[in-house]
Amino acid sequence: MSSNNRSHKAELVIERLGKKLNRQIVGSLAACVHCGMCTDSCHYVLANPDDPTYAPAYKADKIRKVFKKHYDWTGKVLPDWVGAKSLYTDEELEELRDIVFGKCTNCRRCSINCPMGVDFATFNRMTRGLLVNVGIMPEGVAVVSKDQWEIGNQMGVLKEDYIDTVEWMSDELVDEVNDPKAAIPIDKEDAKVVYSINPREVKYDPRTIADAAKIFYAAGEDWTMPSEGWDMTNFGLFSGDDDLGGAVGRRLYEKVEQLDGKKLVISECGHGYRSTRCEAQNWGQTDVNFKMESSVETMLDYIKEGRIKVDKAKNDSSYTYHDSCNFARSCGMTEEPRELLNLVVDDFREMYPNRGENYCCTGGGGAMSMSEYTPQRLKSAKVKADQLAATGAKFVVTSCHNCVDGLSDLIKHYKLDMEVTQLVNLVADALIIEEKVPVVEEVAPVEVPAEAVEEAPAEVLNGYSFLVTDDEPDMVVFLSTVLEDNGATVFKAHNGDEAMDIARKEKIDLMTLDIHMPGKSGREVFEEFRNDDDLKDVPICIITGRPELRSLIYDRPVPPPEGYMDKPVSEDDLIKNMKKILKVRS
Amino acid sequence: MSDTLNINNSVVDLVKGDYTDMEIESIVYYAQNDLKLGSGFGNAISMRGGPSIQDELNKFGEAETTDVVVTAGGELKTRHILHAVGPKFQEEYLSDKLKKTIHNCLKKAEEKGIKTIAFPPMGCGFYGVALEVSADIMFKTFEEYLSGDTSIEKIVICLNDNREFIPFHERLNKNS
């Protein structure tokens, strides 16, 4: 405690607040007239109509009172009149943390609906930054921030794992199109396009990398992926830490400059696009000498310029489009994705309200990292669920990886009959690629022994033993059938105890594991495996319908799982992931 | 401008790269009081080094700020890890605590007969110590320690990128 009875951290927060005040923030802190217009625009309020603590103006007042007390003349002259109050204890800071991180996704819907121009999201983010600076933040925010500061990406993907995944996708694409020129170039200098991605693509959704590569290949693009500085996401935007935001942006920009790339293309990610394209140059106090654009613009240009051909009949379901808050509301990217979507699907159904007025998926550019707020986040997703259901579409398309997770989570929670996909997947699926016929040199015919012309076995998992652990009988049947159809031997466990019994008796090459199971949970099984001398080296792939529980696995003090998949799981994705973990090449 | 500073019979080098993947006798990990490796470099150490490192740490329980505990490097390319519990998030008396933590790393290394140590920029990034502050305290502590009688031969400061490298490089050349 300092001499004025204020904790050291509270003192630092108040002092730093003064350094963060600029015209935009002061205007927002001073201008609120408590008219209530923001209230109707907030998805938290809509889900909690009887709880005034969710109202943006109420939340704003928790920050505004400190500004009034210390930095505004009205608070000095008439403190009681304007509600000026200081902060004194760490407990008050923790209470503030639960408001700025737990009761707002910084979606900015209230900001654009405020007649006074109060940008609540901007000073909510600033407050997050003040708290992070003194170490007061949700555990998930700390984990992700530290990963991005030190490893260089917000999911802690190590360089060897990134390279391995890109090479794996590259090999698959070369095989698929039967052309070695389709290989993904890494660290190619002087390329016209440097492609940056979200670490989620490496860890949970490598198909998006392969799909993007396929599109670049079809367009005949001169492109590359960097071996380092490849993460275009920026947790500084979410956590409010401008220093992190600047460091991450500069790492990415420096790599493009080092490679002498002409254009940085940012894969589909709302907060990634906003931070890389619009914010990080300010945070990092730097300029860039190359063009930056979203992959949505790149793909659209390819079609318009005739560089790729697509057949929309290949995407024959019904589709709606979810505007990411960062991509649409904050960056104005509303028409390009719709134009592209209409070029690759027949049945597009608009969602209402849309564009800048769209509701947040509740992923909030990082909100899913904070499992302690999951119940209130999912409750607030009700309005989004209603929006989705009203379209009657089978697929919701979004240009944001955070939204993919946020939407998947709420679709499961509200039991909607819908799947999430991205434009890169739809464009890749609609591509028309003429198969390359290998040039065969004329050579004298050679007699080939009969056994040499036998086709390679289609059963790519032949000889491998799997343990499938899941409490849902349908899931056990599905996973087992797919694995057995691909030649594997499968042992089935319907709970954690059964899994441990089987694992101790049989030789297992890989276990798939559900997290949420009655009795012994997936987390306990996972930790027991890792701490057992005989089982610790068995590769484990988590397959869960509760993505918000992933921290239960990844935060354990044992090596992380070798693979991770969200339900629902497709046959192709399952086999791709199993092959990757077992390092099986087809 | 040099990347190397000679102090008495020892040398301090600046390099760019990931120090958890470096082939070197020992590395310093900026640890938390509960000695859990956690995320960031801790995640890299767990992933590349295996579970034996955390197992060994668990035997120490918790540690006070400025303490340093030593474990083996598991499957890393280093033989020893100095887990240094440095100050965090603008806590009180930060400079003094940071200096003492770095000093304790050197002392502990010497006790263990370690001659070569790789340091990250101590306290920078997630824990909020400014690069210039960290560089100044690190070099001052190295200068004081290495000017005396010591068996430490080489210190490497490993920096992730130019943003980190430049302030350390400037500080090093201010001295030479």
Image: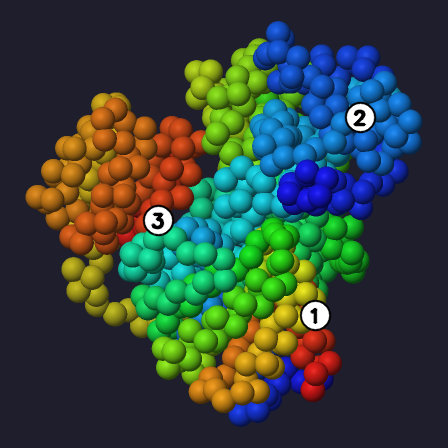
Image height of A170 relative to B72, above or below:
above
Image height of B127 relative to B80, above or below:
above
- Mark 3, chain letter? A
Asked whether the residues under the numbered discs 3 and 2 touch, taking CB atoms below 8 Å apart as contact, a structural biologist would say: no
Lateral position of residue B7 relative to residue A333, left or right: left
Q: Mark 2: few, some, or many residues within 10 Å (few <14, many ≥20)? A: many
The residue where tag 1 is placed is B167
Q: Residue at x 47, y 68 (%)?
A: B28
Are labels 2 and 1 assigned to the same chain? Answer: no
Give the quarter of the figure containing the N terminus of chain A.
top right
Mark 2 and mark 1: Cα distance apart in space: 41 Å
Q: Residue at x 67, y 60 (%)?
A: B130
Query: Does the image show residue A271?
Result: no
User: Residue type at mark 1?
Assistant: Pro
Label 2 residue SS: loop
Residue A557 numbered tag? 3
